[in-house]
Each structure stands twice: as structure tokens, then as C-alpha cells.
Image (tube, rainbow, N blue to C red):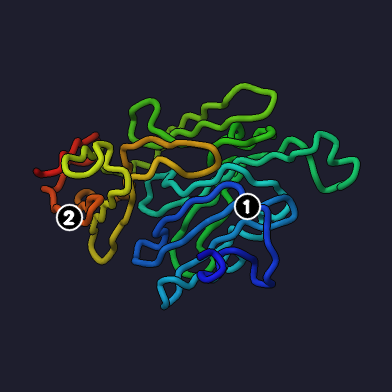
Amino acid sequence: MGTRSSIAFDEFGTARGAMGIDSARFRNDDTLGIAIGNFANQMNALYVQQRDSLIFADEAIKAGVGPASQALLKFGLFFFDYDLGGRLDVMTANGHLEEDIEKFQKNQRYRQPAQLFWNRGGKGMSFLPVPAEKCGTDIFKPIVGRGLAFADIDGDGDLDVVMTQINGPPLLLRNDQKLGHHWLRLKLIGAKCNRDAIGASIRTRIGNQTLSRQVMPTRSYLSQCELPVTIGLGKATHVDSVEIIWPGGSVEKIETPPLDRLTVVRQSR
């Protein structure tokens, strides 16, 4: 299926050393994107769905997540809305395999900084690398990064990050979003489907935009993210509708939940 869908190789037909992977509708429409973190001297991949829903094209260079990532060896990777702006951003945890790699490749280091890409929207250069002055220096401390996961650890609505590293303790990066952005946070409980509602999709409509998110803890590299789904709303103070597509295909519209707090949604029997 990877070969048939054009996600098994780069545009020249060369296999790459894929590690972390995630998928999302990062453009706030029906277009699915698959992001993959690759080996050192290989760019991130961002395979974007074309008119044929089973055909993808690598738009990493066009979108902005490619060239800036090329030198790094990427492991953990996921989509998440780090600033609650309503668009899904991308983060990677990075680190080489060889402790003495810089003796053989002058542009390489064993310990490498993470990368964070902000999604500014649009179909062109939509992702921009976030500098330290916009998110603090701790996130870019060079480590031998491997696992990467997110969760709202401190319960304030924005998503915190955990990175694991070789020969070092896990790092907990607390997110203190100060932009005044609003958010929805939903915890789904299945009745007819699995209790954790893994696989369920949430479609939130705001004006002419549809924000699609999925209950899917398995993402990144050897990592599990939290089950509740956080949906950033930016400056919006209300949503027009919220629809849940439960595993199995049943669709349920829910009353507009309150903003800036956790709402538990139980599947109707």
C-alpha cells in the first residue's frame, strides 16, 4: 500500500530511514497529510493527499518542513496545536545513533536540538521553524532524542511535551501559552465501540473552517500520547457545531460544549 500510495519512497524513488510518523488534516479541510521523520541528511517527509484519495505527493519542501530538517536525525514526530491557534503544528525529537559521528561527518552531532514548526495556514510555505525567542530555549537543548509525546500535564488547556533521550532522564517541557487563545477539550467514552473511543474523529466547525481531530494515542516513535483531544480555537469565542464519528461509523452531534474546560462525552446507546 505504501508503494501504491506513493508514500514508500522520496520523489526520486529512494527509500529513506523513517522513524516517527503521524497523520492529520493539518489544512483544516478534508486533505490528509502524513508526516514522517527520516534519517540524518534526509528531510522530513510530508505526504499530502491528492485528488485520488489513495495517492499522496511529498510536499515537505513546498510546505516548509523539509530543508530545515535535513541535517538532523529525526525520531519522535507528531502534529499538535502548540499555541492553540486552530492549526496543527509539527514537532520532532532528534539525535544521532553514533556517539562519534562528528569525527566522520563534520555537519553532524550526536546530541541534537528538537525542532518545532508553526503552521501559519495556506497551501504554500505553511510551516515556519519556531525560534527560541518564541518558545523558550529549553526545547532546543541538544539531547540524543528518541521518544516524543504530548499531554496537558498541568491541566491548563495547552499541550505539554515529554521527550526521552539516550543516557539521560526524560524531559518535561511545560507549555505556558500566553496568547489568550481559547480551546475545546473532549474526553470520549465509548459504549458501542471500544471504551477509550480510539479511532473516533471529532469535526468542529467554526465559520467556513472544519477542524478535524482523531482520538489516536499511538503516534510519534515508540510513544503514546494522551486520549483526551484538545482543539485550539484561536480568538474564536464559540463554535458552530461539534460532530463525533465513533468507531463503527455512527455519527453523533453534541451540544456545543463550553470553552476552556474539559468536557466528557459518552456515546449514546
Name the secondary structure under disc 2: loop
Q: Position of residue 237 (x, y in %)?
A: 22, 48
Alpha carbons under labels 1 and 2: distance apart: 34 Å
Decide: is 121 above or below 114. below
- Badge 1: how crowded within 10 Å, few (<14), some, or many (20+)? many
| Most foreground residue, 179 or 85 | 85
Q: Measuring 35% from the left and 52% from the top, which residue is drawn there?
A: 86
Furthest residue toward front:
1
Compared to 35, does 109 lie above or below? above
* Label 1 or label 2, whichever comes before in sequence order: 1
Q: Is residue 239 left or right of residue 219?
A: left
In this rendering, position of residue 26 left or right of residue 257: right
Q: Residue at x 25, y 66 (%)?
A: 208
Give the image location of residue 146, x and y in percent: 62, 36
Residue 10, numbered label: none
Q: Quadrant of the C terminus?
A: top left
Mark 2 Cα within 10 Å, few/some/many (few <14, many 20+)?
Answer: few
Q: Which residue is mark 2?
A: 250
Residue 241 lies, in percent from the top left, at 17, 55
Using residue 106 as the reference point, say whether residue 41 is left or right of it. left
Q: Mark yes or no: residue 260 visible.
A: no
For this rendering, which residue is in front, 143 or 85? 143
Q: What residue do we see at 75% from left, 55% from top? A: 41
Return the residue at label 1. 18
Check disc 1 and report its element: helix, strand or loop: loop
Q: Is residue 189 left or right of residue 180?
A: left
Dividing the picture into quarters, in which one does residue 166 lie? top right
Which of 93/126 is in front? 93
Asked if residue 158 can be seen in this view, the reply is yes
Outermost residue, right side: 103
Say which amino acid is labelled 1.
Answer: Ala
Identified by mark 2, the residue type is Ser
